Structures are given as C-alpha cells and as structure tokens.
C-alpha cells in the first residue's frame, strides 16, 4: 500500500500519523508535508518509520540536490514533464544513485508521459516503481498514441515499447481535435 498525503500535513502531523500507520508496513509515505516549507520533508524523512517519497512538484535539478543533501528521503519523484524532459530526469536519477536513493517518476499526464517514464524505467538502474493513471484519463487519450503498455497480472510490471524513440507514434488528428 502506498499512501499519498498530497502535502496536507505539517511535519509534526506527518510524523505522528506515520508512527501510527507503521504497523501496516506501508510501501511509502508520499508528499507528507506542506509545500509551503520544502525543508520540512527532511525532518519527516529522518523520523518516519515509513519510507518517504517526494519531489513531484520540483521543477529544477537543484531542488533534488537539496533533497539529497537533507538526507532523510530516499525515494525521489521527478515529474519529467515539468522537470524539463528526459535529460533532466536522468540527471536527477544520477544524483539519486550517487545518494543511494531511488527514483519513482511522478506521472499522471497521459500516454505520452507514460511512454517517457517507461523509457526511463528501461535505462535507469535505480528505477523503483512507476505510477500509471492512463486508465483514468479522458477516453479520447487512448487514441492519442499507437502503443499502450500492458500490465503483467503476475508481477504488476508494465510492458516496455520496442519501437524507436519513445516507442509510440502520436495521432496528430486526435491531438488537434483536443487542443490544450
């Protein structure tokens, strides 16, 4: 079980709740502290009996350096779409690797973003887990690309594309019919 707190707790509340939930053996405690004070996550990471994951709102590599420097968080969640793409996300993965940490990219943006994250999964040695929300997107997004991952029911793993580039082709007509 992974719990996403959506940055709703103060540091003290997050630590208190994590201690109460610890017997459940949760996989992680995501975004446990308010975004008003980014440094609060360090105190939670050091005191929480549940591994802390954070970083989905970070839009610079330097913010992840600060996260590594704080030392209490070992699951970094870069969002490739707001971090500047694959290259910057690879830089965060390298930073996390040097820190002894993992990356678990945040991704709720649709099938193109899923393809980006799956390419990262294929080449990053400290890749931990991938969230996948494509089934909850607007129905037209399924027609936006030519390939979609399948989920192996035994392992829970998403399949990887085998075509060049991101492994997908964009249906431009569908994209034009749904401007942002």
Image (cartoon, grey):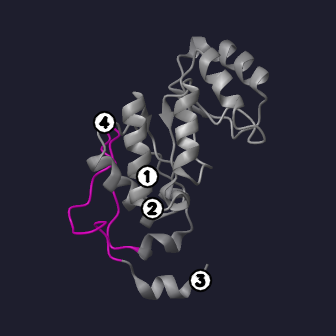
Marks 1/2: CA–CA distance: 6 Å
Residue 179's mark?
Answer: 3
- Residue 150 appears in the picture as rendered: no
Q: Give coordinates of residue 101: x percent, y percent.
A: 42, 30
Near mark 3 (Cα within 10 A), the count class, few <14, some 14-19 or many ≥20, is few
Q: Please, is residue 115 above or below residue 120 in the view?
A: below
Residue 89's mark?
Answer: 1
Residue 155's mark?
Answer: 4
Marks 4/3: CA–CA distance: 36 Å
Of the image marks 2 and 4, the number of the one nearer the N terminus? 2
Magenta stretch? 145-169
Secondary structure at numbered mark 3: loop
Magenta span contains residue 149: yes
Near mark 4 (Cα within 10 A), the count class, few <14, some 14-19 or many ≥20, is few
Q: Using the rendered view, name the quadrant where residue 6 is placed.
A: top right
Secondary structure at numbered mark 4: loop
Residue drawn where x is 54% and y is 56% of the image: 108
Q: Please, is residue 71 above or below residue 125 in the view?
A: above
Near mark 1 (Cα within 10 A), the count class, few <14, some 14-19 or many ≥20, is many
- Position of the C terminus, as image quadrant, is bottom right
Of residues 49 and 138, the one nearer the viewer is 49
Near mark 2 (Cα within 10 A), the count class, few <14, some 14-19 or many ≥20, is some
Marks 1/4: CA–CA distance: 25 Å
Residue under label 2: 85
Comparing labels 3 and 1, the label whose residue is closer to the camera: 1
Tell me if label 2 and label 4 are in contact, CB under 8 Å: no
């Amino acid at each position: 079980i992974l719990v996403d707190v959506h940055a709703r707790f103060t540091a003290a509340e997050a630590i208190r709740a994590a201690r109460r939930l610890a017997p459940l053996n949760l996989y992680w405690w995501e975004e446990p502290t308010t975004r008003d004070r980014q440094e609060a996550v360090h105190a939670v990471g050091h005191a929480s009996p549940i591994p802390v994951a954070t970083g989905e709102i970070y839009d610079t590599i330097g913010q992840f350096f600060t996260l590594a420097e704080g030392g209490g968080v070992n699951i970094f969640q870069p969002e490739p779409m707001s971090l500047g793409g694959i290259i910057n996300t690879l830089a965060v993965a390298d930073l996390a690797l040097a820190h002894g940490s993992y990356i678990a990219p945040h991704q709720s943006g649709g099938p193109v973003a899923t393809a980006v994250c799956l390419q990262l999964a294929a080449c990053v040695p400290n890749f931990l887990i991938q969230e996948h929300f494509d089934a909850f997107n607007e129905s037209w997004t399924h027609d936006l690309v030519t390939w979609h991952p399948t989920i192996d029911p035994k392992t829970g793993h998403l399949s990887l594309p085998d075509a060049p580039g991101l492994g997908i082709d964009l249906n431009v007509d569908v994209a034009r019919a749904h401007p942002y």
